[in-house]
Amino acid sequence: MGSLAFPSPVLPGKEAAPAEVGAKLAEHPGLQDFLANGTLSLVRVYQMTTPMGDVVTTYQEADSIERSFQSQIEDPSEVAQLLREHIKNAHGIDLAEASAPEGEQWLEYSEPGGPRHPGLGFSVPIQPGKTDLLRALSGETSGAQKEGWEALNRDLGVTLHRAYIIATPMGDFASVYFEAPDPAETNRQFAAHASEFATYFKSQAGEAFGIDFSDPLPPVTTVFEAVRTKETA
């Protein structure tokens, strides 16, 4: 099972489109066939307003991430056509001409065997020259600082935490996704957390993103969620 989170900036004036299309997709009778054809088991989509405009973050899990994107391009179904039209109109991306996003995962934490919880996803641009800082932080969270990283997530009630570096024509982005019983409250608790590791982690991530993580993130809205209940073709 693969996973990926990636950003899609929203064109000016199209801020309402992701939620509108998300509602149409959620009610479409062909949604389960679309998910099965793309081997997608979970798709969650979030929208956040930033100083550079609204940014949508999509988190997905699939048997094959490559096939999931290929299906979006080739699937002749009404759901796939609706999705392609939306991505072109709201994000200015023609899937027939665009390359699938390639993610380099730099954070991983999971509580094995636990239930799935609500999620929260966001994407931010990485400051020029700071991508390697995130790679170094990745090495620490899986190495010397692994105990502190795991303890922070447990303390916040986080059961799944993943982040990816995504190369885009606008520069490198980081897309972050986590699950917790109350993600908005977890966001607030993370901002206030004062443990030695949390303080260090926030300072390193803040330098990479140009963000002060002692303040909570702006509100994040869930605009779409789908779980596959049908077997793949």
Image (cartoon, grey):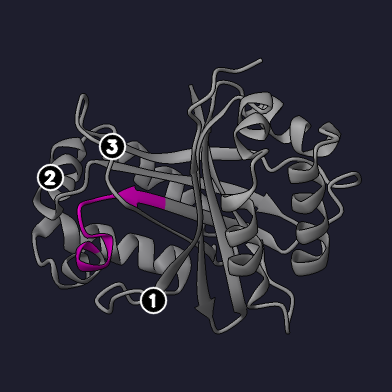
Question: Is residue 224 or residue 153 the one in the foreground?
Answer: 224
Q: Secondary structure at mark 2?
A: helix
Question: Is residue 140 or residue 120 the one in the foreground?
Answer: 120
Q: Quadrant of residue 77?
A: top right
Asked if residue 3 is positioned above or below residue 48 in the image, the reply reads above
Q: How far apart in space, not on screen, are marks 3 and 2 (Cα)?
A: 10 Å
The residue pinned by badge 2 equals 154
Rendering coords of residue 95 (x, y %): 83, 47
Residue bounds of the magenta highlight? 177-186
Rendering coords of residue 200 (x, y %): 22, 60
Question: Is residue 27 or residue 36 the one in the foreground?
Answer: 27
Q: Is residue 71 magenta?
A: no
- Residue at 63% over, 52% down: 25
Q: Secondary structure at mark 1?
A: loop
- Three-letter amino acid code at the position of disc 3: Tyr
Residue 109 image label: 3
Mark 1 vs mark 2: give the one in front. 1
